[in-house]
Image (tube, rainbow, N blue to C red):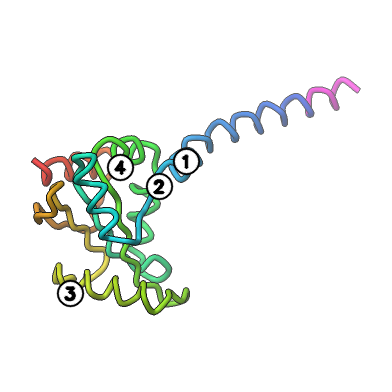
């Protein structure tokens, strides 16, 4: 009987730690808003005096895009940074998922405007919509990627 209680108690502790460990990830995903309407995002950037980050991605097929999302964009650290500094736009070019014709056309137009040649391409605009820099996948932590973005924004 003592062994059963101890096993149950141990399982409860492990479950509690798992829930606490996953909470920042869930918070990040729920607090990070990716716009698909560039014009709306640009208006918001002007209103809130924030930079615009456009993520040109192949979300369901591009290994570097998937890795960038997992290692940076899906972290609570990035969510906190983005909430203060950025308006986020996702221009997705999936192969498995079907976008609406309208959304696919909008994404293509944006990709032509910013001369996107590969994925992921990250475009940073100032609050007035002027290009301040482009980047892509980089090895390292979310913190190092955020520092890189800050350098581009300065």
Out of 74 and 42, give the one closest to the viewer. Answer: 42
Q: Earlier in the sequence, mark 3 or mark 4?
A: 3
Decide if residue 93 is on the left or right side of residue 117. right
Tell me the tag on residue 25: 1
Q: Which residue is mark 3?
A: 112
Q: Name the N-terminal-most of marks 4 and 1.
A: 1
Magenta-colored span: 1-7
Position of residue 19 measured from the top left corner of the image (x, y, whole percent): 60, 34
Residue in front for this viewpoint, 87 or 133: 87
Name the mark on residue 142.
4
- Residue hosting label 2: 74
The reply to whether callout 2 and callout 1 are in contact (CB within 8 Å) is yes
Q: Earlier in the sequence, mark 3 or mark 2?
A: 2
Residue drawn at x 24%, y 51% as measured from the top left: 43
Gap in angstroms between the C-alphas marked 2 and 1: 7 Å
**Which residue is drawn at the image coordinates 40% and 52% (left, top)?**
70
Q: Earlier in the sequence, mark 1 or mark 3?
A: 1
Residue 151 placed where, x, y %? Answer: 11, 42
Mark 1: secondary structure: helix
């Amino acid at each position: 009987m003592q062994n059963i209680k101890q096993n149950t108690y141990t399982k409860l502790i492990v479950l509690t730690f798992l829930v606490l460990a996953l909470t920042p990830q869930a918070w990040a995903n729920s607090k990070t808003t990716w716009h698909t309407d560039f014009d709306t995002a640009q208006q918001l950037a002007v209103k809130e005096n924030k930079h615009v980050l456009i993520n040109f991605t192949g979300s369901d097929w591009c290994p570097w895009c998937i890795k960038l999302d997992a290692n940076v964009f899906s972290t609570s650290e990035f969510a906190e940074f983005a909430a203060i500094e950025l308006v986020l736009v996702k221009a997705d070019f999936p192969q498995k998922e079907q976008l609406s014709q309208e959304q696919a056309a909008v994404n293509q137009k944006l990709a032509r405007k910013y001369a996107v040649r590969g994925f992921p391409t990250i475009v940073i605009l100032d609050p007035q919509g002027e290009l301040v820099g482009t980047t892509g996948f980089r090895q390292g932590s979310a913190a190092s990627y955020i520092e890189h973005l800050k350098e581009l924004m300065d």
